[in-house]
Image: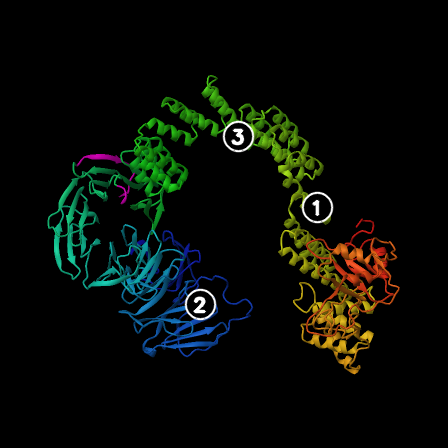
Amino acid sequence: MRAVPTWIDKVHDRDKIEQCIYDLAFKPDGSQLIVAAGNRVLVYDTSDGTLIQPLKGHKDTVYCVAYAKDGLWSPEQKSVSKHKVSSKITCCGWTNDGQYLALGMMNGVVSIRNKNGEEKVKIEQPGGSSSPIWSIAWNPSKDEHNDILAVADWGQKLSFYQLSGKQIGKDRPLTYDPCCVSYFSKGEYIVMCGSDKQASLYTKDGVRLGTVGEQNSWVWTCRVKPDSNYVVLGCQDGTIAFYQLIFSTVHGLYKDRYAYRDSMTDVIVQHLITEQKVRIKCRELVKKIAIYRNRLAIQLPEKILIYELYSDDTSDMHYRIKEKICRKFECNLLVVCSQHIILCQEKRLQCLSFTSVKEKEWLMESLIRYIKVIGGPPGREGLLVGLKNGAILKIFVDNPFAITLLKLSTSVRCLDMSTSRNKLAVVDEHNTCLVYDINTKELLFQEPNANSVAWNTQCEDMLCFSGSGYLNIKASNFPVHQQKLQGFVVGYNGSKIFCLHVYSMSAVEVPQSAPMYQYLERKMFKEAYQIACLGVTDNDWRDLATEALEGLDFDTAKKAFIRIRDLRYLELINSIEERKKRGESDNELFLADVHAYQGKFHDAAKLYKRTGHQPRALSMYTDLRMFEYAKEFVGSTDPKNTRMLMAKQADWAKSSKEPRAAAEMYLSAGEHLKAIDIIGEHGWADMLIDIARKLDKAEREPLAKCAAYFKQLQHHGYASETYAKMGDQQALVQLHVDARHWDEAFSLAEKHTQLKDLVYVPYAQWLAENDRFEEAQKAFHKAGRQNEAVKVLEQLTHNAVGESRFNDAGYYYWMLSMQCLDIAQQEVEMRRKFEVFQRLAELYHVYHSIQRYTDEPFSSHMPETLFNICRFLLNNLTKDVPLGISKVNTLYALAKQSRKLGAFKLARYSYEKLQELHIPSRFQEAIELGSLTVRSKPFHDSEDMMCYRCSTTNPLLNSQGSICINCKQPFIYSSSSYEVLPLVQFYLEDGVGDEEAVCLIDLEVPHTEKGSGATRTHTHTHARPLVSSQQGGSHFVPVRVSRAVLRSMSRRDVLIKRWPLPLQWEYFRSLLPDVSITMCPTCFKMFHSEDYELLVLQHNCCPYCRRPIDEPN
């Protein structure tokens, strides 16, 4: 810090007597200065010290002056309020917001009051009246969180307090009586004057920094010009001194670390790349700073502190004290090395260890103008020194002898050495940048308008220099590249240039494009790559990669393309490198590939032709759809290549949504299959049939493709014509089958018997799908596929059960059983299936009525019919329950009908059985209510069932099944009402055949009525039991009849089930004369004749097997 006097004036009265200056005040804009001199008030112009005017009117000494900013007092008050205080007031000051007033008094007390005059805080100094408060000032800084009051008293102390009265820090002792304290600028510093006849500059914490101006008498007042660095002093002898304070930059730089002084007592170390900063508080005036590698040296007034980094990490910013040299030094420049500090004082250089031992000293022949550490091993670093007389020296700290590098004719301003130590850049006092070869002392080049210079630490041939508001970058011996830049260049690292402008250091990112292009113009690709690595744009990298590729420097091109991640060109380079490994060495061919990749197709074609690789050129043009250029390249002499071009052009037309043109081109090129594909995909049948008719029948593949497209387009006539031309009868049959043209298919099948399966099997499947099962069965038989017929019906049956269509399920199971019976002659297993399917058919047929009764609101069946149906079903469910049949529904229906018909015992049994099963919630309440109310009924059934063979009374439900409990004779039921019919089955004795038995029975011709195609028998005479003596037993004993018994039977009393082989006929005799019974000739189910006739009238078919009434037996 330096104080430069701007102007000085001395005030006298008329008698030439010096007038004491007690107070000063600036106009708020700083243009005028108000001076209290004796009993006069003087107004000065601050720019040059001219007295503008004296203000008279005071008869006594003026001790205080102030400039009104917004009036004398608050405008809402009519008069000034007055308050008594305990002692004489010596000074006062308002806080920044004007809410509080601090009063300094003669008794050593500071009183802080609000606007109403009420005392809020009282601060008492320990010295009391011996330490009168002579000056106070509030810190004007807006960055402070609290209002801070500086207090100077004549106990020779400086103190700081918060608005609350709390002291900040300790008292700062002074060596004089302070007369005035003022904050400098915006609160960063304090200016204070007094009995020591000078004004001093302090930090805002009270650390003395230096002298502003020395005078010959007490300095009573000092004020700071608003928003500037000017200070004015007022003295006892009438002197008014106006000073400008100039703060010099104290800083140091090493590579990307910059250390500088802040607030005069702090050091901030800034990492110029990462922008990290660390503050080191020294609490004393920082005089010099030096930084080198991991060392930082700070010179304070009475000592030098040596800091080091905590770690070797390049981004580490944590410093700790390594050594303290507690001595006062006077020096112009300070340099630090790994183990030494270098002090420069005019012509003398001293090397001291960190323990303050002087190890070396060099005395120069002229003043030292510049010094810089240029690196080296620890303890043996080299220094670059520039002298005023133009000498440039290199000094090693372990060598007492300096080495002269160069001797210039003018003074040295700035120096730097290249990274290899081979080149030296110098800026002389004429602002000329001179670059020398250190080994040969040759001047390589020089450039004007330079004030500082720096070599690039990452590139040997690059330097930059600044001057005249421009930054100049020079690579090798190429012309200088300029761009605007304010300040001084102090470092150059990669693409970053470190620039000091006024007091701030900044890292400027400088693209290295210009020098890179300079190298590219000379085809110096490797050097250009080194420059690009320092920092260029992606476009610059691409230009470098392209130029290197065209220059066949594949290594550089590859590295450059990797930078911009261009995989396409990297694949090209890799392929070229692989070809080189295989022995290819034709650079023109490689260059042709490069031109092709770059889009220079005509150049590439010329090179391909020159190197004898015409097919590559042709392939390139066709891939790019440049067919006209390809035709020019081929000419008209090569028909093979011309056809190939046509095919390629057709490919392009197809991809470019011109299918008709593409198809015509394919036909011209002889590519029939591709043409057919395009025509077929677009459905142009007329065009397709023309092609099919023109093709030879030997060309089976294109013909087959035509036929397939006709089939797809539903043009069966064209498809048939094409298959006929090919002679492919199998495909023709399949066409008719797929189109359901059965007549044509049957016609072909008759001519070609080996194709029978291809027709009848799909036909049968189609019939089955359309519910034409009998026709489907015949078709399966024709095709010899009985098993397939069974499988189709099984699937239909399963679906019907799953969909609760139990009537259909019963019918499908009957159909299945009959188909199994057809197959049973060849397969024994089918007979067992026949019996199973017959039983399932009857169970599902019966359950259909129960399911409708439980699931639908109304039923067409009488209660007796439902009662019989439920009993029949339960009597036959003694084993496993088939899928879909609900025992709960059956028992529930039986319970309800039993109660209606008075069979209370059976009803109670049904409710008890229901309690053992999982009951749906919809039946739960009804079943629970029914099971309770049925207990009030008598425990017996209203009627039982009688066996027509042995006349034994049977229970309504039999756990053994639908047989008599005595004779075990199976009951024969009506397939409509499910009442027990008065029929007994009998068997023929051994030796009596079916035909003979029928003849014996037919000896008496019965009276037969024909109707509905069924056999109806009327018994007019009372029939005796076949075996009246048959009694109970554990096994069923069938009734066997001899020829004599057969001869005695009436044909009207006998019903015969004429089963086909391998089954035997079954014979039944009616035992009640008045009961008319009808048997369906197809399914052999028995009915009461009246019921059968009614059902036939309703459905026009048998209710069980659905045989139409007009169908012959």
Which residues are drawn in magenta? 441-459
Q: Earlier in the sequence, mark 2 or mark 1?
A: 2
Q: CA distance from mark 2 to mark 1?
A: 118 Å
> Which image quarter: residue 891?
bottom right
Figure label count: 3
Tell me the colour scheme of the image.
rainbow
Q: Residues within 10 Å of mark 2 (few under 14, many from 20)?
A: some
**Identity of the residue furthest to the front in this view:** 1044
Secondary structure at numbered mark 3: helix
Q: CA distance from mark 2 to mark 3?
A: 89 Å
Question: Which-is-in-front pick, marks 3 and 1?
Answer: 1
Q: Which residue bears the numbered disc 3?
A: 651
Amino acid type at image mark 3: Asp
Instruction: Name the spot of residue 1044 as percent of width and height, x first.
Output: 79, 62
Q: Earlier in the sequence, mark 3 or mark 1?
A: 3
Q: Is residue 646 left or right of residue 1024?
A: left
Question: Which-is-in-front pick, marks 2 and 3?
Answer: 3
Asked if the stretch drawn in magenta spans residue 457, the answer is: yes
Residue contact between numbered discs 2 and 3, judged by CB atoms under 8 Å = no
Whether residue 302 can be seen here: no
**Identity of the residue furthest to the left in this view:** 400
Instruction: Name the spot of residue 880 as percent of width and height, x first.
Output: 65, 67
Q: Earlier in the sequence, mark 2 or mark 3?
A: 2
320 w.r.t. 908: above or below? above
Question: Which-is-in-front pick, marks 2 and 1?
Answer: 1
Q: Which residue bears the numbered disc 2?
A: 95
Query: Residue 707: which disc?
Result: none
Q: Which residue bears the numbered disc 1?
A: 778
> Which image quarter: residue 485?
top left
337 w.r.t. 939: above or below? above
Q: Is residue 402 left or right of residue 500?
A: left
Q: CA distance from mark 3 to mark 1?
A: 54 Å
